[in-house]
Amino acid sequence: MASTDLDPQGLAGRIEELLEGITADGGPAVGHAAEELVRVLMRFYGAGLEQMVSIVRAGAGDTIVHRMAADPLVAGLLALHDLHPVPLDQRLTHAMGAATRRLGSHGSGLALAGLDDEGRVHVQIEGGGCGTDTVKDVVAASITELAPEVAGVVFDAVPAGPALLQIGVRPSASPKRVG
């Protein structure tokens, strides 16, 4: 299976489904044992990845680590183990910029609001008219692609500002005659 066929978010969801199924079929004790197995394997693979990143950095510097992190699957693994070479806030800013560029004028009312205690990214979005679902989909996809470790994306509606007052030239009392 190629790395392009693997979706980190989808795989995480599948692991969760499997653990829930094991708990449902085998009971709480079996479920806890399965969760502990996953934790031990995560620590094992995380330690191996950390060692690999250290070896690559020692031999070739950060350039190769950054190139590895450009692959979505590798980026997800590195982020999962706190080894991603680019800080989360920078990746979120880049994701918002990429989404805004993709959306063109439809992305003008977006702003990154921050990360909550549950690991969800909050994005402020103005209005709620035509195309809002598409805007949300593009933003969420961009964020999860560059920051797969976030728990989700929450869109906070920003109320529209006051209506603009149109100021025009007042017609004079008596029109000028041309003649």
Image: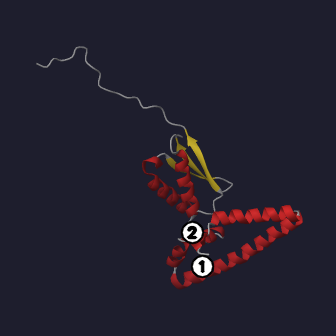
What residue would you read off at disc 2?
72
Query: What amino acid does circle 1 point to?
Result: Val
Which residue lies at the image location 56% right of the left edge and 84% below the top edge?
58
Position above or below: 160 against 40: above
Q: Residues within 10 Å of mark 2 (few under 14, many from 20)?
A: many
Give how far across and how far down residue 84 sits, in percent.
Answer: 59, 70
Q: Residues within 10 Å of mark 1 (few under 14, many from 20)?
A: many
Residue at the far left: name it. Answer: 179
**Real-space CA distance between mark 2 and mark 1, rounded to the nearest whole angstrom:** 16 Å
Between 44 and 31, which is closer to the camera in this rendering?
Answer: 31
Which residue lies at the image location 25% right of the left edge and 14% below the top edge?
173
Residue 126's disc number: none
Which residue lies at the image location 52% right of the left edge and 73% below the top edge?
66
Query: What amino acid does circle 2 point to?
Result: Pro
Give how far across and how far down residue 10 sits, in percent.
Answer: 65, 63
Which mark is nearer the camera, 2 or 1? Answer: 2
Residue at the far top: name it. Answer: 174
What residue would you read off at disc 1?
53
Q: Is residue 107 left or right of residue 20?
A: left
Residue 176: quarter of image: top left
Position above or below: 117 against 63: above
